[in-house]
Image (cartoon, rainbow, N blue to C red):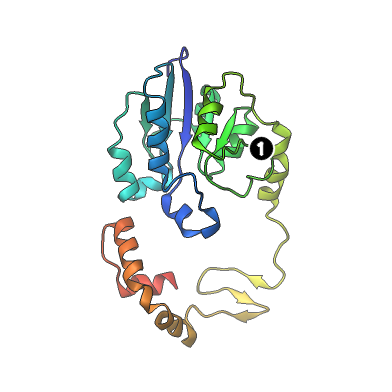
Amino acid sequence: MDPNKINIAIFNSSEDELKAITEWQTPLFNNQNDAIGELLKMFIKEPEFHFYLRVHPNLGKLDNIQIEGIREMSYPNLTVIQPHDPVDTYQMMKACNKVITFGSTTGIEATYWEAPSVLLGKSFYMLQDCVYLPNSFETLFDLIKNKNLAPKPKSSTLRYGYYVSTNGYPSSHFDFQGLEKSSFKGHHLKKYYPSTFLFLLKYAPNIRQWSKAFKALYHRNLSIRDFLKFN
């Protein structure tokens, strides 16, 4: 990492996590790879800026469209750090001038470590005034170019940190002991009920869409066993 350059860390997330939740959608971009590509093209003629994409560790288990897109990225201002690379995420936060995330906890963690943090996607901490929230790519570019951009107050991260560490109130009725031994108000919960198969019939019209998404994610066809596993 060249200390004479303005180094920007990008921490991506699994694309399926963003697409699976309607409320997590954003008008800024269609997918993370497109957003990263747009960003890199904007700074392609500004060699003083260099970007480091830290691919999320969960993506190391997959070989899907998102991973293929990352493999195809070829920009002189980008260094890709693979999922299983031993580089330390927190040292990377401290070494870079700014951090860009799409919703992972690294966004708020960067603020805790006193790095200017920009959130492009959505997250549970987005309303805590702990990250910058650009509403357009023009605003994003301005934030990156701003050499005097200060990190959000470290104190803004503490409330969310407390929430995550305590996980709210303990459940008084539901006792989770896995798919086979969990109970509700003392009654054992079965893994399958007759209604389970009724729900399968209800959602049968969506099987083609599920199968297409499943194949894109896992590079194999959806099977009956997969249906039972999901339920």
Instruction: Name the residue carrying label 1.
Output: 130
Q: Give the left or right position of residue 168, taking residue 120 as reference.
A: right
The image quarter containing residue 159 is top right
Badge 1: residue crowd in 10 Å (few <14, some 14–19, many ≥20): many
Residue ID at (67%, 48%): 165
Towards the viewer: 46 or 231: 46
Towards the viewer: 217 or 85: 217
Where residue 44 appears, as percent x and y from the top left, is 37, 24
Does residue 45 sit above or below 165 in this rendering? above
The image quarter containing residue 226 is bottom left
Towards the viewer: 65 or 81: 65
Q: Quadrant of the C terminus?
A: bottom left
Does residue 127 sit above or below 45 in this rendering? below
Does residue 190 sit above or below 157 in this rendering? below
Residue ID at (53%, 53%): 24
Residue ID at (69%, 43%): 128
Q: Quadrant of the N terminus?
A: top left
Q: Give the left or right position of residue 162, taking residue 58 as reference.
A: right
Where residue 115 appears, as percent x and y from the top left, is 60, 27
Where residue 132 appears, as percent x and y from the top left, is 61, 35
Where residue 151 appears, as percent x and y from the top left, is 64, 28
Q: Residue furthest top?
A: 4
Q: Amino acid at mark 1?
A: Cys
> For the residue labelled by badge 1, is the local secondary structure a helix, a strand or a loop?
loop
Q: Give the left or right position of residue 148, taking residue 91 as reference.
A: right
